[in-house]
Image: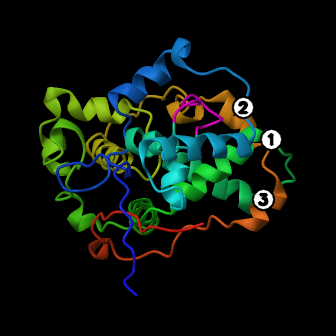
């Protein structure tokens, strides 16, 4: 008997934003930045129950001709019930703000490790579902592995030759950024509030180290207290992070993948299909 092949014309896959070297871009897209910076564009309605979110997602997938048996595709149409991107589909967040996605994953890992008793809530259910969804992609797993293995491991002798990897100066080396600091770009990077582990953060540490070496013979002016990270400025999310159920954390572990050599980082490839 010949196996029937099913075709789903409405299937949608995540389209990650990538830089010139093929790495995932972690900074927010223009659309995401506009929402983060304008509170009037943010959804302030009460969070919905997960079963309602799921039914709505199944309806969306079915209406466009997608595969309702594909768990990843259905989760992509779950609507976020927390944070400044509340009201946007899970898929949209992966396509528009990978940096925020990494922030959510790492904070959930910290909460899991703390063992602090936490309460239930629809926002928390949504957060857990989104993290599960994000971790099902090889691209996100590879980025977690890269950051876990690469942070603070780059040899000093090779730091000068590291590529920036983001923005308009993506193809410049760290040393070229330092040597051309008169144009103001290096100073701009050093004054930014960066998320630890990102390319900008690592470049920032390199530039600050070079600056300290250059000014070692002169008194260092006292620094003003550092501004809190932009990603941390999300009160609703913070409340969600402080109210995660321990029972749900026992169901799913969010451990950082084992470190691998930076040179062995796999290329970005589509996430594998998984069924219910």
- Above or below, 173 against 3 in this view is above
Which is nearer the eye, 258 or 22? 22
Q: Earlier in the sequence, mark 2 or mark 3?
A: 2
Q: How many marks?
A: 3
Which is nearer the eye, 232 or 65? 65
Q: Position of residue 144 (x, y in %)?
A: 46, 62
Q: Position of residue 237 (x, y in %)?
A: 66, 35
Q: Earlier in the sequence, mark 1 or mark 2?
A: 2
As drawn, the label of residue 216 is none
Q: Which residues are magenta?
A: 79-88
Alpha carbon distance from label 2 to label 3: 18 Å
| Quadrant including the C terminus | bottom right
- Residue 100 in sight here: no
Alpha carbon distance from label 1 to label 3: 11 Å
Q: Are marks 1 and 2 in contact (CB under 8 Å)?
A: yes
- Mark 2 lies on residue: 47
Alpha carbon distance from label 1 to label 2: 9 Å
Does the magenta portion include 83?
yes
Q: Residue at image x 27%, y 74%?
A: 263
| Quadrant including the N terminus | bottom left
- Above or below, 212 against 131 in this view is above
Q: Secondary structure at mark 3?
A: helix
- Mark 3 lies on residue: 248
Does the magenta portion include 200?
no
Q: Residue at image x 67%, y 52%?
A: 128
Q: Position of residue 99 (x, y in %)?
A: 44, 44
- Mark 1 lies on residue: 121
């Amino acid at each position: 008997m010949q196996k029937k092949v099913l075709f789903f014309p409405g299937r949608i896959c995540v389209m990650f934003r990538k830089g010139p070297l093929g790495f995932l871009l972690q900074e927010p897209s223009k659309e995401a930045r506009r929402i983060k910076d304008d509170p009037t564009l943010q959804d302030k309605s009460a969070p919905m129950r997960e079963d309602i979110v799921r039914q709505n997602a199944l309806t969306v997938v079915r209406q466009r001709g997608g595969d309702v048996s594909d768990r990843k595709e259905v989760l992509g149409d779950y609507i976020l019930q927390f944070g400044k991107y509340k009201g946007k589909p899970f898929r949209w967040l992966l396509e528009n703000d990978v940096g925020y996605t990494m922030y959510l994953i790492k904070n959930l890992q910290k909460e899991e490790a703390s063992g602090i008793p936490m309460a239930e809530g629809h926002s928390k259910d949504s957060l857990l579902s989104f993290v599960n969804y994000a971790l099902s992609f090889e691209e996100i797993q590879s980025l977690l592995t890269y950051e876990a293995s690469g942070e603070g491991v780059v040899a000093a002798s090779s730091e000068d030759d590291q590529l920036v990897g983001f923005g308009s100066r993506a193809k410049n080396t760290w040393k070229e950024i330092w040597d051309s600091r008169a144009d103001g770009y290096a100073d701009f990077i050093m004054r930014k509030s960066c998320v630890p582990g990102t390319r900008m953060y690592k470049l920032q540490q390199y530039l600050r180290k070079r600056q300290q070496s250059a000014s070692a013979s002169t008194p260092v002016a006292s620094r003003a207290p550092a501004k809190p990270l932009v990603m941390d400025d999300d009160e609703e999310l913070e409340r969600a992070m402080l109210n995660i159920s321990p029972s749900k954390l026992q169901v799913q572990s969010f451990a950082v993948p084992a470190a691998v050599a930076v040179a062995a980082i796999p290329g970005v490839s589509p996430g594998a299909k998984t069924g219910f």
